[in-house]
Image (cartoon, helix red, strand yellow):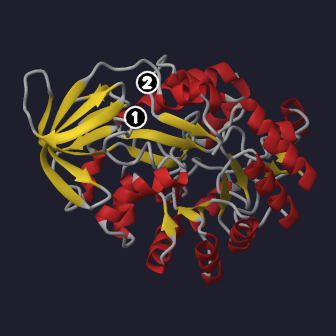
Amino acid sequence: MKTLTSLGLLLAFGGAQAAPQTVDCGRLLDVKAGVWRERVSITVDNGVVKSIAPMSAAAGNIDLSAYSCLPGFIDMHVHLTGETRKEAEALRAALTHNPADTAYRSVPYAERTLKAGFTTVRDLGAGDMLNVALKQAIASGAIPGPRMFTSGKTIATTGGHGDGSNGLSTTFGRAVGAEGPDRGVINSAEQGRQAVRARYKEGADLIKVTATGGVLSQARNGQDAQFTDDELRAIVSTAKDYGFRVAAHAHGAEGVKRALRAGVDSIEHGTLMDDEAIALFKKHGAWYVPTISAGRYVADKAKEDGYYSALVRPKAAAIGPLIQATLGRAHKAGVKIAFGTDAGVFPHGDNAREFAYMVEAGMPPLEAIRSATLSAAALLDQSSNLGSVEPGFAADIVAVSGDPLRDISVLQQVKFVMKAGVVYKQP
């Protein structure tokens, strides 16, 4: 990731600093050791965990003695500046909403996500610099929300998944403007380099490319490869020059493999990956971010008349149901997996359902939790700051009733949320 300056550290981890306090936990999950620490007190100062000791139960402490505490969760694939809606409603919004309208509507999405226990997210695509602005508003303390790492505008090819003019008439397509590198639409290796530099200029933290077609774009195919090898190599090599990691949306096997050979850091969705793709994941050390929740949601909505357009509906019905089984294969093969949901494709705040879907696919509960803590932090290059409750780490703490190692569904009912020492939700 880009080197964080003092201002960058404030924006990534800061906002107003909380007063020193102590949190008493009935038990705390040590995600590294995979064991519960019983009856502990966590001392927090200046937004950071200072110490963990046997429970003191002193007056003034935050009393979570009846709860199980865990690190705040990290969702590696969200879109906080939008949310699913029926086709007719989406079209009306596209024609009538200005960027300011979209920005205001994103505020409750961010708060719902935080209060669901997700203290950090990776936002993978929004136009008009909306996700960059939302990140800065949250970091300054102006609005509540998770800590954000953003890709700015997705990089796509003409007509590809992420081209904002797809499906529009020529009149409205012209109104969108001549798509080009500044707007994240490229058609050559050189334009790919320009698009990366444009994301750097607008304040992105990473790069996202749409290596294949997508489910919800107004285009015929949801799985075809949409970048040439030289375009992908140019984007990845330029991204590395700027300290960016690269996430690649990809459903079809050929697009997955091209992206992995080019050196991307993560594949999002990966629905139709084959054995060769799995071998490339392991060869290159890339991460897989499954987004089962989105797949399940679009498959269900494809059965509802009028929810998706005639172009989208068959793709949602065909691709959506496959992601969960793909995760099971990838996990069994030893591919590195980081938690991600594609929230926005389904309602924000329901992110924790992904844990149950991962367990259904064959991941043990502890591994599912690690995917949203230690693994996600590693993919963010934040392993020394996030993903664990221990001295020196950001004071991101959530609490639930019950034992998620026995019943993963309890993570869908978070009772307490602290981010960087600030309490946003409590019993």
Q: Evaluate whether residue 165 shows in this view.
A: no
Q: Amino acid type of disc 1?
A: Leu
Q: Which residue is at 90% across, 48% downward?
A: 191
Q: Is residue 397 above or below residue 372?
A: above
Quadrant for the C terminus, please: top left
Q: Amino acid at mark 2?
A: Pro
Q: Name the side, left or right, on which 234 lies relative to 10.
A: right
In the picture, the disc for residue 114 is 1
**Where's residue 37, x and y in %?**
16, 52
Mark 1, Cα crowd under 10 Å, few <14 / some 14-19 / many 20+, is many
Counting residues from the start of the chain, the first of labels 1 and 2 encountered is 1
Q: Residues within 10 Å of mark 2 (few under 14, many from 20)?
A: many
State the mark number for residue 144.
Answer: 2
Assign a secondary structure to mark 2: loop
Res 82 → quadrant: top right
- Return the x and y of residue 277 as percentages of the image width and height: 64, 76
- Residue 26 position in % (x across, y down): 12, 44
Tell which of 295 and 91 is nearer to you.
Answer: 295
